[in-house]
Image: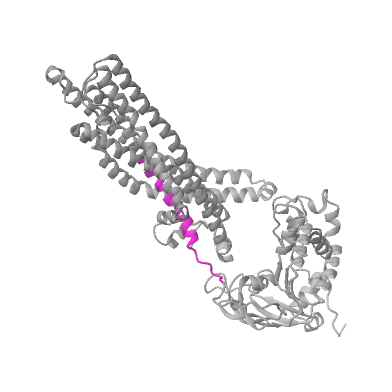
């Protein structure tokens, strides 16, 4: 399901279970690293609590010379009793320094271990998730790509997965920080003064509940922001790819206005969410300020009203409380920000795992047919197909093509010629009827086995950024691997395919020959050159069935004749389908099929169809600028 802009909001419905639980499942292979990392993180946080306790002990035991035991004394790290002599104070102070030094050393070591292990694990999860998402995306049907924008796909593969990595990298550690810091401080404060501990910890449940409400409040706004980002990315991607068209029609201002409108929408939604976030965080700071003032008042009154200075709370412990308050509310205030990050990550996880939950429409059967080789016989048996329900593009087509035959397809634009042939490699499945190869329904074949023997050359071929040799070698996995290793045998096969496609001559004239970089989508080559490289790529695969979808439409007449002569030699033992706008390309085909409005209206040889004086004859004479001479003339 897609939204009206070809985005990915509909894929959320495909999420199986909670998206964040699915994200955690990606961490299970690295559980050992995570366990050590989490334990190290807890040790880091606990070690950070020791220096304030050391300061409190120094104030009470060394400076004020009070004999009351503290937490370190209770733990057996310091001696009890008063310290009378200067030598004893020095020894006591040295022990405090040693405890603090050990705490800092432990903190440094465990901090390195926790950050390295947790961050590197987040990177591994990001890698695995992106690889799985890309692999799954590649296996989805052509219908999915037709209904979803490229900008949205890129947003999921990059922005959303990067956001999940960032969440795992930072917010997971923040969760440990909150649990360890709040838990550790709560224990220490309660040990010293339950009353003040209750005051200090009172905001903790309030912040937790408020964060829950904040998540519910902010969630719809972030969903809207994600939709807006996807649309903006799609608009930018379309405009950058369509730069030549924008320049040709001087539509700078028109496109600028469209980008400005979507940028303004994104700005307004982002500012609205920012307003909510800032108000929430300001409320948290106000709450923690109230607690600070409350503890200051209660503890201060204890000192003022105590008899003979015998306050219930010692001066060092009083200092300890305020040192801990800052550390207590810093991670608690972070809870609100983590809640905000969680909602963003959840939105991204819904899109990522929704995409992973999208089932491919075209899949291998349970027991696929895997022949060692194909003869190439193709049969269309009463085939009907449409991209949308109840809107067929191909209607009741029946056609039997013997192995090794060449069939030309003619007819007006939109007649269904390309759509019909897309059913052979099973880019789509028929709505009714069947497409058979060697008498076996293509739905019974293993997809890879079938497509290894079916090559397609389109009117607007797609070339990858890279060299000419790499693009030609893409037609055969073994040659591509050999090409990457610089195999001379592989390069010779590439050159042979290029010669057959009449590409070798122009490639040899390029600055670096077959090693010339052709740019994104082959932009450095002309349209005719791109078509010839694509033909070479298809021929290199040595398929039993070849589909040429107006594959010579962008070459001049002389080059077309040379390519056609080469193709005729190369398809002698293969089944070939040739869709042609210029009928001269298919006049020597074994059979010509004329389609109109999704149906076959004529079939036969070139001479037979001319004699019939039907649609084919009209097209032929219109292109040749000739008229038939009647017997009466």
Position above or below: 420 against 247 = below
Q: Residue at x 43, y 60 (%)?
A: 15
Q: Which residue is most to the top?
A: 86
Image position, residue 374 (x, y; %): 70, 78
Quarter where residue 445 is shown: bottom right
Residue 151, compared with residue 92, is above or below; it is below
Q: Is 63 left or right of 104, judged from the image as shown?
A: left
Q: Is residue 609 left or right of residue 10?
A: right
| 354 part of magenta stretch | yes
Total labels: the figure holds 0
Percent position of residue 630, x then y? 84, 82
Q: Is residue 152 visible?
A: no
* Secondary structure predominantly adopted by residues drawn in magenta: helix
> Is 450 on the left or on the right of 470, as rendered?
left
Percent across and percent down for residue 524 are 76, 50
Q: Quadrant of residue 269?
A: top left
Q: Nearer the viewer, residue 361 or 587?
A: 361
Is residue 72 in view from this perspective?
yes
Q: Is residue 343 magenta?
A: yes
Of 162 and 564, which appears nearest the observer? 162
Residue drawn at 79 percent across, 51 percent down: 515
Could you tell whether 474 is left or right of 286 in the image?
right
Task: Measuring from the top left, give residue 467's x and y in whole percent.
Answer: 75, 53
Q: Quadrant of residue 300?
A: top left
The magenta-colored residue range is 335-363
Colour scheme employed for the rendering of this structure:
one colour
Q: Nearest the camera: 19 or 367?
A: 367
Q: Is residue 102 above or below residue 277?
A: above
The residue nearer to you, when weighing 573 against 398, is 573
Q: Residue furthest bottom?
A: 631
Residue at image coords 46%, 40%? 113
């Amino acid at each position: 399901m897609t939204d009206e802009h070809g985005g990915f909001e509909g894929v959320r419905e495909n999420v199986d279970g909670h998206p964040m639980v699915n994200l955690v499942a990606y961490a299970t292979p690295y559980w050992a690293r995570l366990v050590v990392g989490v334990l190290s993180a807890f040790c880091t946080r606990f070690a950070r609590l020791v220096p304030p306790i050391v300061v409190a002990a120094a104030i009470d035991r060394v400076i004020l010379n009070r004999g009351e035991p503290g937490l370190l004394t209770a733990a057996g790290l310091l001696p009890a009793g008063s310290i009378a002599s200067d030598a004893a104070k020095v020894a006591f102070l040295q022990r405090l320094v040693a405890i603090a030094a050990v705490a800092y050393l432990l903190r440094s070591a465990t901090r390195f271990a926790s950050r390295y292990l947790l961050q590197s694990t987040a990177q591994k999860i990001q890698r695995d998730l992106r690889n799985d998402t890309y692999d799954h995306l590649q296996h989805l049907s052509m219908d999915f790509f037709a209904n979803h924008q490229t900008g949205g796909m890129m947003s999921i593969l990059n922005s959303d997965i990067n956001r999940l990595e960032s969440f795992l990298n930072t917010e997971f550690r923040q969760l440990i920080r909150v649990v360890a810091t709040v838990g550790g401080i709560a224990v220490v404060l309660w040990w010293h003064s339950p009353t003040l501990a209750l005051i200090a910890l009172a905001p903790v449940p309030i912040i937790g509940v408020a964060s829950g409400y904040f998540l519910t409040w902010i969630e719809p706004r972030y969903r809207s922001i994600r939709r807006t980002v996807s649309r903006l990315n799609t608009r930018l991607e379309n405009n950058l790819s369509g730069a030549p068209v924008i320049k040709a029609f001087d539509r700078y201002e028109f496109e600028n206005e469209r980008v400005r409108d979507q940028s303004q929408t994104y700005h307004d939604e982002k500012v609205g969410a920012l307003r909510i976030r800032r108000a929430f965080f300001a409320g948290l700071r106000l709450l923690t300020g109230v607690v600070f003032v409350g503890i200051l008042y209660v503890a201060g009154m204890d000192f003022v009203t105590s008899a003979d200075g015998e306050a219930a709370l010692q001066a060092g412990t009083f200092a300890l409380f305020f040192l801990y308050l800052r550390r207590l509310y810093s991670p608690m205030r972070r809870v609100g920000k983590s809640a905000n990050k969680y909602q963003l990550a959840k939105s991204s996880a819904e899109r990522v795992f929704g995409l992973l939950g999208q089932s491919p429409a075209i899949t291998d059967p349970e027991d696929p047919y895997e022949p060692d080789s194909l003869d190439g016989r193709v049969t269309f048996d009463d085939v009907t197909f449409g991209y949308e329900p109840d809107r067929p593009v191909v209607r009741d087509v029946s056609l039997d093509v013997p192995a090794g035959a060449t069939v030309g397809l003619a007819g007006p634009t939109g007649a269904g010629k390309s759509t019909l042939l897309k059913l052979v490699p099973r880019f789509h499945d028929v709505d009714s009827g069947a497409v058979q190869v060697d008498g076996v329904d293509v739905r019974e074949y293993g997809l890879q086995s079938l497509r290894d023997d079916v090559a397609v050359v389109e009117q607007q071929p797609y070339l990858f950024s890279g060299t000419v040799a790499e693009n030609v070698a893409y037609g055969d996995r073994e040659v591509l691997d050999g090409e990457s290793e610089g195999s001379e045998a592989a390069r010779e096969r590439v050159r042979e395919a290029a010669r057959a496609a009449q590409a070798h001559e122009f490639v040899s004239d390029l600055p670096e020959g077959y090693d010339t970089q052709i740019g994104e989508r082959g932009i450095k080559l002309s349209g005719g050159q791109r078509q010839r490289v694509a033909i070479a790529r298809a021929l290199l695969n040595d398929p039993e069935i070849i589909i040429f979808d107006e594959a010579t439409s962008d070459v001049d007449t002389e080059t077309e004749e040379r390519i056609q002569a080469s193709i005729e030699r190369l398809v002698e033992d293969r089944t070939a389908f040739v869709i042609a706008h210029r009928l001269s390309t298919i006049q020597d085909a074994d059979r010509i099929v004329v389609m109109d409005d999704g149906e076959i209206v004529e079939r036969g040889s070139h001479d037979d169809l001319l004699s019939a004086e039907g649609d084919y004859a009209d097209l032929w004479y219109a292109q040749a600028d000739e008229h038939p001479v009647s017997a009466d003339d």
